[in-house]
Image: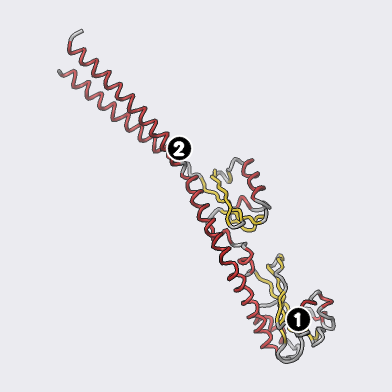
Amino acid sequence: MSETKTKKSVGVSFAAIITALLLIISCIAACVFINSGGSPAANAASAALDNAKKSVTNFVDDSVRLEADYYDNIFKKVNTAVVMYQGKNDNGELEKICSAAGADLILITDAKGKITQAYPDEKLVGKTLKENKMNAFGKITKGIVDKITTDPEKTDEGYKINVGIRRQDSDGVLVLGVTDDSYAVVAGETLADSCGNNTVVEKDGKIISTNFAPADGCESIEAFEKKAKEAGNTFDGKHYEIKKGDAEGYTVMVAAADTGSSNTTSVIIIVVTNVVLILIGVCLYLVGSKKK
């Protein structure tokens, strides 16, 4: 074998070895990159979970103020009603008072708790607060308190609450019934929206708030997890990365849609580029060797 051919063979062998080594190094780097970085969807879900947990913590820290604001607003309504009433007869005035106060019920009692006027159910006139399961308002007629509320009760129309206040024109009580959705904020039912998209919030084993459609109708996160497992975390043709964590006694779950792109694509591009560059180098070497 001539010296030129020997040099050429050695050069080709060397190029092949270098090519193999670079491929191995690229593959190792790719594996490390994938394992250390995780998929974009998983990273997004982890970041979303951290943000959601912070939002829950802020909600808990702010819960006392939220509840106080709710009751302040309720008492403003009943104060408006009691100022407007001032002993007016039921000639349409009670309906006007209800409308002005944003209420759906008004009762007027005498000093003994007997209902003297009512809107919209006039059949209550002549009955006592106790007969209508409103005996708690008797504390006002007895001079124990000046105002009192029942606990908000969830209904199909919203949260219903009755609030009573001492009459200004005479002894007795004015009771106002209010039904709206404002207590939902205090109860945490809007919490998912402040946590971010695709969030589920659970308290005491029951989902109280969610803006993630696949979780609608699920009583608990555990029930949703079972549903998600059966569906392979795929809903409406989209696969989701799901993360779960705890914050201030609440369980929070978030989902991030997998867009189909991942670090693997980037790694493949890097490896292919390296291979192409190496092959070009080898070709140039071979062409240069033939000219000698």
- Left of 193 or right of it: where is 218? right
What secondary structure is marked by label 1? Answer: strand
- Left of 9 or right of it: where is 173? right
* Image location (x, y in percent) of residue 264: 43, 37
Residue on which the image places disc 1 = 119
Measure how far apart labels 2 and 1 are at the Cα level: 68 Å
- Residue at screen point 21% across, 12% down: 6
Tag on residue 96?
none
Query: Pointer 2 and pointer 1: residues touching (CB < 8 Å)?
Result: no
- Residue at screen point 73% across, 83% down: 174
Q: Earlier in the sequence, mark 2 or mark 1?
A: 2
Residue on which the image places disc 2 = 35
Residue 232 lies in quadrant: top right
Question: Where does the C terminus fall, quadrant-wise?
Answer: top left
Residue 90 lies in quadrant: bottom right
- Residue at screen point 56% across, 46% down: 242
- Crowd rating for badge 2 (residues with CA inside 10 Å; few <14, some 14–19, many 20+): few
* Image location (x, y in percent) of residue 71: 64, 75
